Image: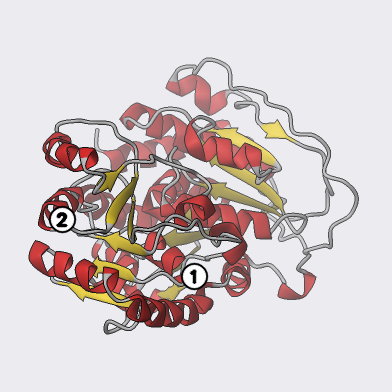
């Protein structure tokens, strides 16, 4: 059975087993009243079979007591890690605190789950488990059953990236709740192209936002919508979350690399550029997880000798990026694909020049070498030359950094949150 056929079958079975109710009513937005109460973890029971899921009362969720008149927004985000899309969603959810009842459908494990708990980002959580095909189907049903039960208060479903939309399509269909899709995807996938047209038919009411033109094109190529249907809403960059109060002094120019050690992020390019920088007084500082695998083993081994000479240092991951940027003078981003590139935008907010591959998303951020230096993506020699030039010229670093700081001002969280809130159907005049 194909995914599309299975989705249609599930919808039919859900409609047959879930009691009918009045059409959903859109609840007016109210100001924050009273306290938020405590958040208690209630895990789902062991997953029953597919038929049982359709007729059971549904998994328990984490919930805190709050204002019953508040509208509810369900945020759906399945990745467990702290990629740019989840970090940006965290800023949005923090900005909506006290204004809506925030329900998060996502994993409770991993760095994302930890951040949600540490920052108290969700008033209620619907735990999603499993990312394989069977897990995705169960999660889609779990979300649909929750939405069906709470549709009288639910204002909108926020689907983070196309994966969030695919998980939310069933819920939107059975409960007629509008979906707001915030597309962060950097590339079009074969799965997206196969499923996109079916999802487009399933979802009754959908509003599309994309962080850049690159992400918007992914939605169009996946058959989800037309370009005219998409509003550009960038990732929010909150200076207080990314800019340190002070910078750590150093007698060397420090070149920061933030990202995973993958081919898409250009980790192999980084290794080659480090070879070309042998003898330089600069130092590469790699804020990444040193987990060696088939994809990156050769690059790690290539850089091992440079660690002995301190050309390369590996401080590792620090989820407080303020400490990371305090140790950087230049940020190097050799990515091959990006939809927005949050790292580059954060560097700009810090007044740090960026050396990056000339791909559409990074050109949109940096301009024509205005906030950094762009090079042809696979040209290692050009990348090394740009880094050497900036390392030797503090005045140029300051000039590019100042321009970057100005350009990053367009990503302040307030306007981003209000643009999304408008798509949810919230009244801007009631912001907390």
Residue lying furthest right: 34
Q: Position of residue 21 (x, y in %)?
A: 68, 44
- Residue underneath mark 2: 279
Question: Is residue 220 shown left or right of residue 90?
Answer: left
Q: Quadrant of residue 125?
A: top right
Estimate the spatial distance between the alpha carbons at disc 2 and disc 1, rounded to whole Å: 30 Å
At a point 76% along the width and 68% down the height, the residue shown is: 431
| Placement of 59 over or under 268, stated as above or below | above
Residue 277 falls in which quadrant of the image?
bottom left
From the top left corner, tell me how far across and down residue 231 is, in percent.
45, 75
Assign a secondary structure to mark 1: helix
Q: 335 or 185: which is nearer to us?
A: 335
Q: Is residue 14 visible?
A: no
Q: Is residue 126 left or right of residue 361?
A: right
The residue where tag 1 is placed is 349
Q: Which mark is residue 226?
A: none
């Amino acid at each position: 059975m194909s995914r599309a056929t299975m989705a249609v079958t599930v919808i039919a079975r859900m409609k047959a087993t879930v009691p009918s109710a009045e059409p959903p009513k859109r609840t007016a937005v109210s100001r924050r009243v009273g306290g938020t109460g405590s958040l208690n973890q209630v895990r789902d029971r062991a997953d029953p079979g597919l038929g049982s899921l359709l007729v059971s009362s549904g998994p328990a969720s984490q919930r805190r007591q709050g204002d019953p008149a508040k509208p509810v927004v369900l945020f759906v985000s399945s990745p467990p890690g702290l990629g740019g899309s989840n970090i940006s969603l965290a800023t949005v959810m923090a900005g909506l605190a006290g204004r809506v009842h925030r329900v998060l459908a996502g994993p409770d494990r991993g760095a994302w789950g930890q951040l949600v708990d540490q920052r108290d980002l969700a008033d209620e959580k619907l735990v999603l488990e499993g990312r394989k095909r069977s897990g995705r189907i169960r999660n889609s049903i779990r979300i649909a059953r929750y939405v069906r039960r709470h549709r009288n208060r639910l204002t909108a479903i926020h689907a983070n990236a196309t994966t969030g939309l695919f998980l939310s399509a069933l819920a939107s269909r059975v409960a007629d709740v509008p979906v707001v899709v915030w597309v962060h995807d950097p590339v079009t996938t074969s799965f997206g192209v196969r499923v996109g047209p079916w999802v487009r038919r399933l979802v009754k009411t959908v509003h599309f936002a994309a962080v850049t033109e690159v992400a918007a094109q992914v939605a169009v190529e996946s058959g989800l919508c037309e370009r005219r249907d998409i509003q550009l809403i960038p990732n929010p960059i909150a200076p207080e979350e990314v800019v340190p109060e002070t910078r750590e002094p150093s007698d060397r120019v420090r070149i920061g690399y933030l990202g995973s050690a993958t081919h898409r992020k250009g980790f192999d390019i980084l290794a080659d550029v480090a070879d070309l920088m042998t003898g330089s007084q600069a130092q590469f500082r790699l804020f990444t997880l040193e987990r060696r695998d088939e994809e990156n083993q050769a690059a790690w081994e290539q850089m091992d000798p440079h660690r002995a000479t301190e050309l390369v240092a590996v401080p590792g991951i620090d989820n407080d990026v303020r400490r990371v940027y305090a140790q950087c003078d230049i940020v190097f981003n050799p990515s091959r694909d990006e939809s927005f590139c949050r790292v580059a935008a954060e560097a700009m907010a810090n007044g740090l020049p960026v050396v990056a591959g000339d791909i559409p998303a990074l050109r949109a951020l940096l301009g024509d070498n205005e906030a950094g230096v762009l090079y042809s993506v696979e040209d290692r020699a050009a990348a090394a030359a740009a880094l050497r030039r900036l390392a030797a010229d503090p005045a140029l670093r300051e000039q590019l950094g100042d321009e970057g700081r100005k350009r990053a001002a367009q990503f302040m969280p307030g306007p981003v949150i209000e643009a999304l809130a408008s798509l949810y159907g919230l009244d801007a005049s009631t912001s907390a």
